[in-house]
């Protein structure tokens, strides 16, 4: 099938135009930041708005996505997996085949081009699993920008290989030892850097959270995934899928595949959160399933919090889902009923990881394994002619250490 | 007249800037908080900014973040902060107390419930770092209805439109963040600050306090020549961090007295000018 990579262009599907002009998705989203960041965000909103409407920007992004990232990514019908389950057909959107091995580069490429238009020579990022850090370091190298990545010391330990990858790409990795020493603390630290160095620095946020315009901008850059699916599915399967599944930490890969389908009737959207050791244990990161609304990191959304409004530490085997908030658009999709959110435990995600390796020769990221696990559960309950489309958001090479450790193997 | 307005009226008559220390409630422990407030008054505080600890203090530097972590570890929360203010009010009905913190603990309690409990406790003003005027909705009016002054921030990068917006909503005082960056960052340029205060005062009669980067009595003196209030935060919190918990309040008070001397000297500079 011939298809050209498409950039942001008309981001909104007909009949759905959130966020509003001030960045709200119903009661969620917004710009909950200190005065010191207001001017920087206003400058970014203006710059991004100009990029969005500029055909030259769109053409440059489309060209980079096609020739550098390797888009469009294929959709693969996982026949052996489907057969083994004996229920609905499972299709995989292969974001793991992108350059750098995950969907994250769709967004970092877009933001790097915005940064260039704004004349900012330095980019910073926060990272959990390291995938967003690697994707940021990659585009920074591609454009000769200085790059600083903030990463919790806990994550530096469990993702040592990605730390080295970022260094190879010329980035400086700054370990963050405050708070819970994970993604949320890296985000706090990156915000502090930005507020201090805003004149020459562009903050590349890696998920659909943060203050407006980030949730919208990161979604727009990832929505290329869903737009491709809209074209690919009829050619491949004769129709659109019945259910689309994606893992949700902050929620960028899910928002990317969901957004173009929001107004497509008959397509269920299911977000799969990290159930960790089980929701009943409290050791999980299933924010939408078990959290409550509040304000963190510049937006109003669902949060994992205690009775005093303090943010809780989360747990997931997958560092990329280990975040106590979630993108505000997901909060809105949940409340409005357009999408539903479920959770999958560490154990279930690991089992799905191994199954996909053995049945299809595809090693998925532990994050994506959560979506695969729920798709397998759901497929069992459905007839063979039903179609499930899973966003296989990343590849699992980075997780060798974690998976081996979970299996009692040391290298 | 609110306690904050009374304090600034009194200071205007004395031609002196207000000395406003910031400490985090519950640092080093909840049991020390009332003694800390008392010591700050003894050290010359005119208004006290009392930090409500939060797990993710994004706009603060490492010093105040650590103080927040100490307070949380010691069991302090928003309800405990209000209890501490109540206890302080039983012995001091004159010194205004302004709570400063982040939105989420207040969201969790509920804005209306918070406002009424804070008013009952004797809180005079509230500054929520991540409630900018656009997102505050009726926040300012909820506070005003409870007799509490909503305090807002302005910064070196604030546009004229934002200065106007804040001027319309603010009462008590406006907190001018004198640096691009987080709390506890480098020294400030007094001339830059004075220029910006001119822009703010062109739009409002609400007093303007200056904070971020005032780390020694000399800088406090320089700022106090033109500002209505001088906020000392990270430097005092550092002193508390270094001190044995039993002596933290006394050391904070003693340090504050040095800043007070700088501010009193500025009053002399103003009179001479």
Image (cartoon, rainbow, N blue to C red):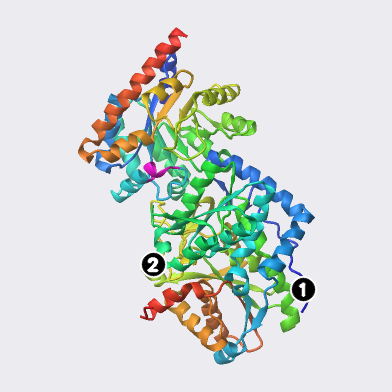
- Look at the numbered discs 1 and 2 and tell me whether their residues touch, using CB distance below 8 Å: no
Q: Residue at image x 74%, y 61%?
A: A15
Q: Is residue B64 magenta?
A: yes
Q: Chain of mark 2?
A: A
Is B69 on the left or on the right of A395, as rendered?
Answer: left
Total labels drawn: 2
Whether residue A108 is situated above or below residue B48 in the rendered picture: below
Q: Secondary structure at mark 1?
A: loop
Could you say which disc has been placed on residue A3 in the image? 1
Answer with the quarter of the image where residue A175 lies.
bottom left
Whether residue A230 is situated above or below residue B65 in the rendered picture: below
Give percent across and percent down for residue B223. 45, 22
From this viewpoint, which residue is outermost toward the left?
B246
Whether residue B252 is situated above or below residue A284 in the rendered picture: above
Answer with the quarter of the image where residue A26 lies.
bottom right
- Crowdedness of circle 1 by 10 Å Cα count: few (<14), some, many (20+)? few
Q: Nearer the viewer, residue B213 or A379?
A: B213
From this viewpoint, which residue is outermost toward the top?
B272
Whether residue A39 is situated above or below residue A61 in the rendered picture: above
Which segment did they paint magenta?
Answer: B60-65
Read off the residue under disc 2: A283
Q: Is residue B44 visible?
A: no
- Crowdedness of circle 2 by 10 Å Cα count: few (<14), some, many (20+)? some
Give percent across and percent down for residue A356. 53, 83
Is B153 on the left or on the right of A306, as rendered?
Answer: right
Q: Is residue A181 magenta?
A: no
Give percent across and percent down for residue A381. 56, 85
Answer with the quarter of the image where residue B262 lies.
top left
Q: Are marks 1 and 2 on the same chain?
A: yes
Please state which of the two labelled residues, at mark 1 or mark 2, is closer to the viewer: 1
Q: Chain of mark 1?
A: A
């Amino acid at each position: 099938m011939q298809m050209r990579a498409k950039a942001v262009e008309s981001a909104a599907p007909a009949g759905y135009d959130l966020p509003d002009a001030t960045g709200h998705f119903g009661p969620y989203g917004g710009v909950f930041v200190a005065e010191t960041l207001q001017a920087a965000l206003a400058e970014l909103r203006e710059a991004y708005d100009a990029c969005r409407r500029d055909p030259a920007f769109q053409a440059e992004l489309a060209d980079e996505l096609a020739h550098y990232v390797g888009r469009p990514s294929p959709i693969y019908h996982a026949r052996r997996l489907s057969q083994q389950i004996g229920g609905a057909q499972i299709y995989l959107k292969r974001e793991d085949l992108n350059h750098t091995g995950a969907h994250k580069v769709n967004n970092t490429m877009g933001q790097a081009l915005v940064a260039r238009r704004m004349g900012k020579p330095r980019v910073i990022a926060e990272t959990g699993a390291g995938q967003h850090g690697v994707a940021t370091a990659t585009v920074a190298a591609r454009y000769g920008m200085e790059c600083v990545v903030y990463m919790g010391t806990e994550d530096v330990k469990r993702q040592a290989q990605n730390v080295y990858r970022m260094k190879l790409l010329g980035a400086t990795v700054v370990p963050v030892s405050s708070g819970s020493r994970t993604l949320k603390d890296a985000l706090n630290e990156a915000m502090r850097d930005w507020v201090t160095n805003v004149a020459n620095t562009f903050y590349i946020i890696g998920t659909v959270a943060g203050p407006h315009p980030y949730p919208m901008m990161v979604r727009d850059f990832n929505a290329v995934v869903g737009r491709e699916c809209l074209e690919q599915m009829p050619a491949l399967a004769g129709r659109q899928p019945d259910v689309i599944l994606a893992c949700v930490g902050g929620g960028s890969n899910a928002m990317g595949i969901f957004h173009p389908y929001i107004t497509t009737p008959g397509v269920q959207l299911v977000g799969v959160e990290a159930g960790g050791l089980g929701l009943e244990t409290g050791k999980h990161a299933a924010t939408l399933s078990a959290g409550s609304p509040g304000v963190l990191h510049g937006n109003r959304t669902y949060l994992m919090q205690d009775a005093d409004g303090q943010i809780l530490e989360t747990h997931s085997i997958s560092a990329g889902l280990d975040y106590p908030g979630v993108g505000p658009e997901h909060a809105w999709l949940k409340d409005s009923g357009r999408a539903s959110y479920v959770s999958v435990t560490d154990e279930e995600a690991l089992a799905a990881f191994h199954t996909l390796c053995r049945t299809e020769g595809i090693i998925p990221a532990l994050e994506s394994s959560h979506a695969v696990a729920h798709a397998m559960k759901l497929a069992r309950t459905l007839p063979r002619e039903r179609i499930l489309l899973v966003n296989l958001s990343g590849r699992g090479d980075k997780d060798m250490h974690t998976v081996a450790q979970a299996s009692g193997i040391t290298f | 007249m609110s306690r904050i307005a009374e304090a600034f009226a009194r200071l205007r008559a004395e031609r002196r800037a207000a000395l406003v220390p910031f400490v985090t409630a519950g640092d080093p422990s909840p049991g020390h908080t009332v003694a800390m407030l008392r010591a700050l008054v003894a050290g010359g505080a005119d208004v006290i900014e009392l930090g409500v600890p939060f797990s993710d203090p994004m706009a603060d530097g490492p010093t105040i973040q650590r103080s927040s972590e100490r307070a949380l570890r010691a069991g302090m929360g928003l309800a405990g902060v209000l209890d501490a203010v109540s206890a302080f009010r039983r012995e001091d009905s004159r010194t205004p107390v302004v709570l400063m913190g982040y939105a989420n603990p207040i969201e969790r309690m509920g804005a209306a419930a918070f406002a009424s409990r804070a008013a009952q406790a004797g809180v005079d003003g509230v500054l929520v770092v991540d409630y900018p005027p656009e997102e505050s909705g009726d926040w300012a009016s909820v506070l005003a209805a409870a007799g509490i002054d909503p305090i807002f921030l302005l910064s070196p990068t604030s546009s004229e439109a934002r200065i106007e917006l804040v001027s319309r909503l603010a009462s008590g005082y406006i907190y001018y963040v004198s640096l691009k960056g987080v709390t506890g960052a480098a020294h400030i340029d007094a001339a830059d600050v004075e220029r910006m205060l001119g822009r703010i005062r062109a739009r409002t009669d609400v007093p303007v306090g200056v904070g971020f980067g005032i780390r020694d009595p000399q800088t406090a003196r320089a700022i106090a020549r033109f500002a209505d209030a001088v906020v000392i935060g990270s430097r005092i919190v550092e002193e508390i961090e270094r001190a044995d918990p039993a002596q933290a309040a006394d050391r904070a008070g003693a340090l504050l007295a040095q800043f007070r001397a700088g501010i009193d000297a500025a009053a002399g500079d103003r009179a001479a000018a």
